[in-house]
Amino acid sequence: MNESVKNICCIGAGYVGGPTMAVFADKCPHLNFNVVDINEQRVNAWNNNNLDKLPVYEKGLKDIIMRCRGRNLHFSTDVENNIAIADMIFISVNTPIKKYGVGAGHASDLKWVESSARQILKYAKGYTIVVEKSTLPVKTAEMIKIILNDGKSKDKEFAVLSNPEFLAEGTAINDLENPDRVLIGGEDDYAINLLVDIYTNWIEPNRILKTNLWSSELSKLTANAFLAQRISSINSISALCEKTGAKISEVALAIGTDSRIGNKFLSAGPGFGGSCFKKDILNLVYISRFYGLEEVARFWENVVGINNWQQTRISELIVRKLFGTISDKNIAVLGYAFKANTNDTRESPAIRICQDLINEGASLNIYDPKVNSDQIYNSLKENQKDFCLENKNINVNKNIEEACINVDAIILLTEWEEFRKINWKKIALLTRKPTWLFDTRNFSNYKDAKKYGIKVWALGTGEIL
């Protein structure tokens, strides 16, 4: 067995693998980190000399890449050789919801995890520690262990650990550098301690939790489900506030000061997005039904249902406010990423809301500070079968002012800081009257918009009279 870990390989150069290994490399200059991916375009983006064109936008990431890339952090498509020299291998590949077959719409598609395990079996040498980093259903480690142990030769030995990430996009670098906790699940104490040794280069030992494999896997799913449930809960109350005259910001403040509840994830909005929340809840639903826990399955299914309903009710409300039709009307969409400070659009509420508005006949001017036009077009095309890339009803704009020219309404969907203090005096001169502002984050300086003749609706408050 290895007395220490020197070479670490990460399979998957996506939103988790790239930033995670970058921080590891920054904190452990004595170790070598190789991030591999079969997507050559993605690897080339990580190796781009223009650090503003990295495939992932996270505050502080490009500074770390500048320090570590080429020193002890490397991005490559050479999967075989980097697995062969690795003492420890992280699996950080995509695990989307299955689109067809058994469990379609709920279960995770683990084909990339299985493929990674088979590559490790084929190319690894000696004693190798395999670490699950992707968010995975409970008992996935069992599959990895069976593949590795049933097919291994006498000169190979494997230990399988679960080390889920607890990153919030937009604050991922800080979450990696200053985590609430690090969770390591496994049965091989020797392997666990080697991974602990890596983390203790910058994290206090009392923040490193050790569990069995299954507790670790389920803890990740449960953490995301609980956070998503809080978002759906506060969003359900936002609708009630609009009917009763209460203000969601005041309700959230009142309940958030209760130490038993706390104030995190109590900002009402157009719904949760990102790669994990919906997928992980649907995994819980699938697992619960598999084990005959129908009541548990229905509970978590309703969390996703509320999220979908929130997006639908926003798009329907916009149509009602614009005299019951938005056909041939122009609407500015400010924000497309699922949250601020990231360029990730996966499961963004903006996708469904934009689709609804397109289906009603509206023309959209879309602006997001970090999401490019290809991401926007591709996400709409992927989620809408009849969408055409040449669709003249969609324009991607370079700034707020350009997006607002001759529009009938402005929808604020992402809480980017630049949307907090928009120059509404200037914007009011660009729009067609009457103009509506729909603030789905209750975030902007909408009182100024009102002052310059723009009609305002804010989520959780309703129309501002």
Image (cartoon, rainbow, N blue to C red):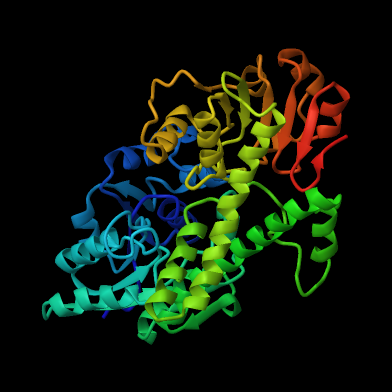
Q: Residue 14: horizontal and vertical position, in percent?
A: 40, 50
**Numbered label tally:** 0
Between 160 and 206, the residue placed more toward the observer is 160
Residue 135 in sight: yes
The single residue placed furthest to the front in the displayed view is 324
Between 33 and 180, the residue placed more toward the observer is 180
The quadrant holding residue 429 is: top right
Residue at 75%, 19% in the rendered image: 427
Between 132 and 400, the residue placed more toward the observer is 400
Quadrant of the snapshot with the C terminus:
top right
Q: Residue 182: horizontal and vertical position, in percent?
A: 53, 72
Q: Is residue 114 left or right of residue 225?
A: left
Q: Residue 234: horizontal and vertical position, in percent?
A: 71, 58
Q: Residue 126: horizontal and vertical position, in percent?
A: 19, 74
The quadrant holding residue 153 is: bottom left
Q: Is residue 9 left or right of residue 394?
A: left
The quadrant holding residue 331 is: top right
Residue 271 in sight: no
- Give the answer, above or below, for where 443 lies relative to 374: below
Residue at 53%, 45% in the rendered image: 348
Quadrant of the snapshot with the N terminus:
bottom left
Q: Is residue 377 left or right of residue 321?
A: left
Residue at 56%, 64% in the rendered image: 302
- Give the answer, above or below, for where 400 lies relative to 189: above
The single residue placed furthest to the left in the displayed view is 153
Residue at 33%, 57% in the rendered image: 98
- Give the answer, above or below, for where 63 lies relative to 433: below
